Amino acid sequence: MDDEEKMSNLLKPVIANDKEDKSFDVGEPPNGGLTAWAQVVAAFFIFFNTWGIVNMYGVFQTYYQSAFLSHQSESNISWIGSIQGFLLMSVSIIAGPIYDAGYPRALLFIGTSLTVFGMIMTSIAKTYWESMLAQGVTVGIGCGLLFLPSVVIMSQYFTTKIAFATGVASTGSSLGAVIYPIVFRQLEPVIGFPWTVRTIAFIMLSTSAVSFPFMRRRIPAPRRIRRMYDLAAFKERPYLFCLFGVFFGFMGVYIPFFYAEVYARTVCSSTSDHYLLSIINAGSVFGRLIPNFLADRTGPLNMQIVFGSLAAMLVFSWIAIRNTQGMVAFAVLYGFFSGSFVSLPGPIVVSLSPAHETVGTRMGMALGASGLGLLVGAPVAGAILRSHGGWIGLQAWSGALVAISAVWMLAARIAKVGSSNRAIA
């Protein structure tokens, strides 16, 4: 038996399990119950090992700048994390039609394999380009294959509780981004960088395995495979404005995640800078739950406008912070108000999709726009930092982008329901 036949036999049970599942329920979404909340558990661990890994990149940024990549600029090093985040979202353009065709478990299997393999290869990387290929590209592609099913599956099981269910699942990313940096900081001085990263890979493998038995499509796959792009969506102003909103939002919102620890150490002379990223992500746990809980009553667009505007104000206030206490307060508040950028876009896209059959494709398009923003935001910020703009230029760049995102979300709301203050959108 050759290698191709072995691989085919390995994947066959996974693929067959998706396509031959006869227990579909095409009635109304249950909006609760054991099976529905089991999907939330599965999505929680996917968020834990996708966004949790992307959100912890600030730890690698700080380590690389003082270790074997110290000869590289901050901008060059941030490209690794930016490409990882970009691929997490842009690969969803490909994953959307694959999911729609009925292969969610195949996406889980291949995505988990790539993320774990990429982290193990990161542990043995010795050069910039080896780190880029392993951590940026391989882990990024794996995360992209994993992430989309965790968001789209919610619309099959929830209606009036969809935003809250997504918010509960997305707290996995915050918890992962709290735990993984602490694991890194505690283990790296003791066992070294290679085994620390391998330990993280083993944690990723064991926790990802939880998702396999739980995640299951409720609605059968359509007979025709849909396109990667729904061109008709670009003619709908609310959805188009939403794409601009997530593009600018993700261009700016992750800059503090990448640079807060470096700022605290170099400007504030802080000895607690190693834990700032964990503090930001701890704050975002509540920033995923509370706005999503309220969004089921007020509308996800309304909540994103509020939280996006307050996040922009906080980034501008970052300019005035010069001490450890201020940075800790900023980390807690910014983590809270920036949390909605991960937890609310999914429910927003669902609310702007005319039919359930188009959700997977439209979600992939929105994630692709988000990925483009994340790709360029942090590296441009690094270039501003090294130029005459300095830290104030970096902070102003981030705050302006997040504010522009809130304006576009407001435009999407007005295009959808008008200017009424009481409209749910």
Image: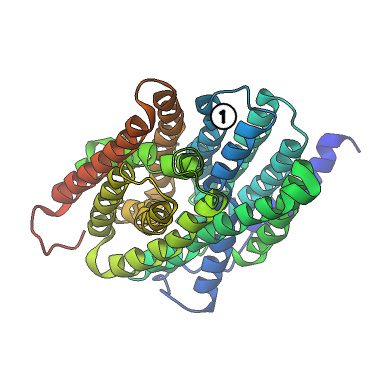
The answer to whether any part of residue 48 appears in the image is yes
Amino acid type, label 1: Ile
Question: Nearest the camera: 199 or 66?
Answer: 66
Q: Position of residue 332 (x, y in %)?
A: 41, 59
Residue ranking furthest to the bottom = 33
Query: Vertically, is 78 above or below 95?
Result: above
Q: Secondary structure at mark 1?
A: helix
The answer to whether any part of residue 233 appears in the image is no
Q: Position of residue 164 (x, y in %)?
A: 39, 68
Residue under pointer 1: 77
Give the residue at x 33% y 45%.
Answer: 318
Q: Quadrant of residue 247?
A: top left
> Quadrant location of the N terminus?
top right
Give the residue at x 65% y 27%.
Answer: 69
Give the residue at x 38% y 48%.
Answer: 358
Q: Position of residue 222 (x, y in %)?
A: 48, 51
> Quadrant location of the C terminus?
bottom left
Question: Nearest the camera: 209 or 378?
Answer: 378
Give the residue at x 34% y 51%.
Answer: 349
Q: Quadrant of residue 346?
A: bottom left
Q: Position of residue 103 (x, y in %)?
A: 59, 50
Instruction: Using residue 377 as the reference point, say whether residue 2 is left or right of it.
Output: right
Residue ranking furthest to the left = 420
